[in-house]
Amino acid sequence: MNKRLLTLVLVLAIILPVFGGLPAAAQDECDFVGEAVIGVIAPLTGDIPKVGESTVQAAEMAVDEINAECGLEIDGENYEVIIVVEDNESKAESSVAAATRLIVDEEVIAIIGPQSSKQAVPTGQVANDRETPMISPWSTNPNTTLDRPWVFRVAFLDPFQGPVDANFAKEEFGAETAAVLYDIASDYPKGLAENFRDAAEEAGIEIVAFESFTTGDTDFSSQLTNIIAAEPDVIFTPQYYNEVPLIVQQARELGYEGPIIGSDSWGTPDLLDLCGDACNGLFFSTHYAPDIATDVAQTFIQAYEERYDERPDDVAALTYDAFQMLFTAIENAQSLEREDIRDALASIELFEGVTGIMSFDEQGDPIKCAVIIQIQDGEFTYYDSACPPGFPPEDMGSEESGS
Amino acid sequence: MDLNFLVQQFLNALQLGSLYALIALGYTMVYGVLLLINFAHGDIFMVGAFLGVFGSMVLNLPFVPTLLLSMVLTAILGVVIERVAYKPLRHASRLSAVITALGVGLLLENGMLALTGADPRNYPENFIVTETYDVAGFSISNVKILIIVLSILLFLGLYAIVQRTKWGMAMRAISYDKFAVPLMGVSQDQIISLTFILGTGLAAAAGILWGVAFPVLNPYMGLRVGWKAFIAAVVGGIGDIRGAFLGGLLLGFVEIFVVALGQPFGISSTWRDPIAFALLLIILVVRPTGLFGVARRQKV
């Protein structure tokens, strides 16, 4: 019995990739005159392999879709889109080497990636120095694009997310006091905790406890007891999916019954398994919700689920948007020259992607809405959007985007 | 700062401290008998926790059978490690044995990583259903009570074995003089195996209780916890089981109360580890052999 099952699995493992290759068949009918080579840098191995997997899946889907429609059309001629994927092992130095190789050896017209700020910040320098357009889908650190005209991104910045969470605490829960628990030894939580504190105080929320721990701690009971003694209306904790379950469960065990709010680092589906019932009903801010109702998002999510049999996470959605932005820029520019693509990217005014409508400031950073997700019965469900003041503009028509 | 707050923090400290104490016992017993610092002990603790995942998720066993299964399997693993890795080095320099222990630790960590992957694990939801009781203004959960009570019972059981049985007497005798005791007809190998059985069994119990209290398990979880428990054993006076238990509790109390009492003095929780370990260092300066330790005279 077991052997038969094993054989079946093995046979499927051999057959399935063959079927996976089928959609590409459509391109035979197109008359390609050349290729447009795009580099992708992703963490296929290392600490966060799931991020790399989502990146490549979204990239392959975006490319297959455009090639099925006969690729990029420039002056009436069709170019096939090819991607070259480089693994950065989730390391900054490998990422820099990968970018150099893509730019010099592969002569790519643009780079999508890297994802984490840790790699995107140094890699952006290489792309900028070598005058190659680069779009980082996931990086939220301001330095990735700062003073680098060749570097763009799709995610919002940390200084935007802090106020989103603070305002949400104020509006949703009428919070007058808040407490923060964060990892002081990690850049992302530390930066976001400080952004939240500043924004909360501006919004008239008093920070009654600002407690920290260091990476690897699992017992937060003394910090949480301090926090609970200060009687906050909400607790904000911008931690990763392996720490959130511990924090939430310990807070409940210590008798805290109020809301706990998080940030985009909560958005990995593993959180749902690890946290179970304890996280039910909690809110966090992030880039996109898998059940968001826009047409663009629904089309993407359906196609992705059909193709990979899993829900796209925020990395996949942002990567897909990065590709669509690049395709839009190339068709607007009607050119495959790096400089023309850069100019066209910089002059995109409004763009509607899976992660929402966005426009770009002079640093190449998107102005876009964040979404608030509520965890409900083991799923991330869309709850609300939080937008910068006056955004999106009201006269925005959907036909204007994606051109 | 009211009484409820202090009682709450006292319970927090008791929970964390009893877990450190259970692990520290294994360090101290092996050191007492073999003069070996078993640096793989933290990783044995991790294996115990993961065997709990195996018992509860794969075999669908409830809490008590899972705990016993994990303790037995981990004890067997402990004996095998001793026979394969430490026994051939019993007459080699102590440095070789310590390096070997570090190697065994790496083997366990990376072996588990290869076996289960890097994704964090936890126990099923019905393993222990957490219930929180509100007693006179402070919160206590059944998990906290379980951990504190079980740890104390396990310690008392161990203490009884060591103090009241022939086997325990033999263990104490070997730690006193490992050359004379075998001449009295006591099998050194058997006593050493027994030491490993008891020490690793307790580490497995600690692993499962840890996993219930902090349900995000990964193959590297034993590293930091192991170091801390080792420090607890040294502060208590390594080689003495009362010392190890007290050292563990002390470490838990220091860690919790630095955060709890530091706040009014403007000391943020960031200072927890520096202050906690500075305090432990001061204890060692005052009593270099630890709280219960006896100075051994080194013959040159």
Image (cartoon, rainbow, N blue to C red):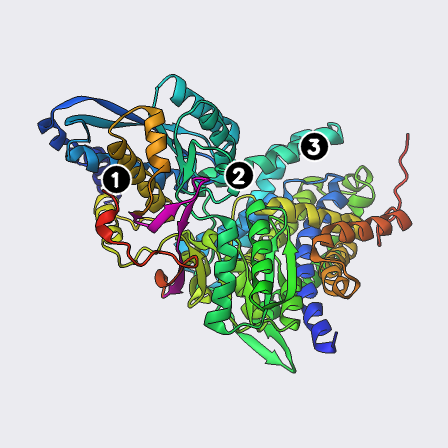
The chain holding disc 3 is B
* Most frequent secondary structure within the magenta stretch: strand
Report x, y in % for residue A62. Answer: 25, 38
Say whether residue B197 is left or right of residue A104: right
Residue drawn at x 44%, y 55% is: A271
Instruction: For the C terminus of chain B, give its image quadrant.
Output: top right
User: Where B150 falls versus A399 (above or below)?
Assistant: below
Magenta region includes residue A326: no
Q: Which mark is residue A143?
A: 2
Q: Which of the two labelled residues, at mark 1 and mark 2, occupies the earlier sequence position?
A: 1
Residue drawn at x 76%, y 49% is: B274
Q: What is the CA distance from the residue labelled 3 to the residue labelled 2? A: 49 Å
- Residue beneath disc 3: B97
Residue drawn at x 74%, y 30% is: B95
Stretch in magenta? A352-376
Q: Secondary structure at mark 2?
A: helix
Q: Residue furthest top?
A: A105
User: Where B291 falls versus A16 (above or below)?
Assistant: below
- Residue beneath disc 1: A6
Report x, y in % for residue B203. Answer: 62, 52
